[in-house]
Amino acid sequence: MRNTARIALGALVATAGAGAIAFAAAPDAAAAPTICPALPGQSSTMPGCTADSGPTGLSLAVVDNGGTASSKADHYAGPAAIALGPKASVTMTGIKPGLAIGIAGPGATVVVDGKNGPTCTGGTSFAGDFQTLKGCWKP
């Protein structure tokens, strides 16, 4: 991956993570969010989140207040999974070049598989996937 592409992809993933942290920082928040980042060839696992990256992927998973997030990337993909609240669940898979983001609120489920369009069910959720050029929104 060229340096310019790495820097741009890293900046976008970092911005998405920072936005999720700011969004999650509610006045009644008891603890800081759990963040699992994975650069190319790395993996990261913490309570509630998992991020795995192949040799050409970037992956990010962020969890706050009882959610679960998992993100897996390769082939120049950069998915970011953000689960905010009880029973929030986000599963992201990056299999083609492109960025993807999934954000789930309490009780919501977001799935991005890189082949079909994203799905948003349950509570408030959002997903955008440049691998498929599709997205979903559930207010």
Image (tube, helix red, strand yellow):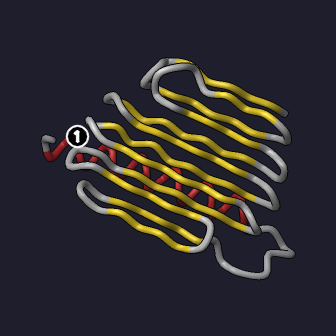
Is the residue 130 above or below the residue 14 in the image? above
Q: How many labels does the image show?
A: 1
Pick the front one: 124 or 3: 124
| Residue drawn at the location 67% of the way across and 39% of the way down | 110
Pick the front one: 136 or 117: 117
Q: In which quarter of the image is the C terminus?
A: top right
Which quadrant would residue 27 be assigned to in this image? bottom right
Q: In this view, does 127 lie to the left or right of 139?
A: left
Which quadrant would residue 96 be assigned to in this image? top left
Q: Could you say whether the residue bearing mark 1 is in a helix, strand or loop?
A: helix
| Residue drawn at the location 79% of the way across and 81% of the way down | 30
Is the residue 118 above or below the residue 89 in the image? above
| Crowdedness near tag 1: few (<14), some (14–19) or many (≥20) residues, C-alpha within 10 Å | few
| Furthest-bottom residue in this view | 30
At which x and y percent is residue 133?
Answer: 49, 18
Q: In which quarter of the image is the N terminus?
A: top left
Is the residue 23 above or below the residue 6 in the image? below
Q: In this view, does 18 lie to the left or right of 83?
A: left
Q: Is residue 8 left or right of residue 130?
A: left
| Residue drawn at the location 58% of the way across and 20% of the way down | 117
| Residue drawn at the location 45% of the way across and 43% of the way down | 79
At which x and y percent is residue 64?
Answer: 69, 66
Q: Mark 1 points at which residue?
A: 5
What residue type is disc 1 on? Ala
| Furthest-left residue in this view | 2
At which x and y percent is residue 92?
Answer: 52, 42
At which x and y percent is residue 108?
Answer: 79, 44
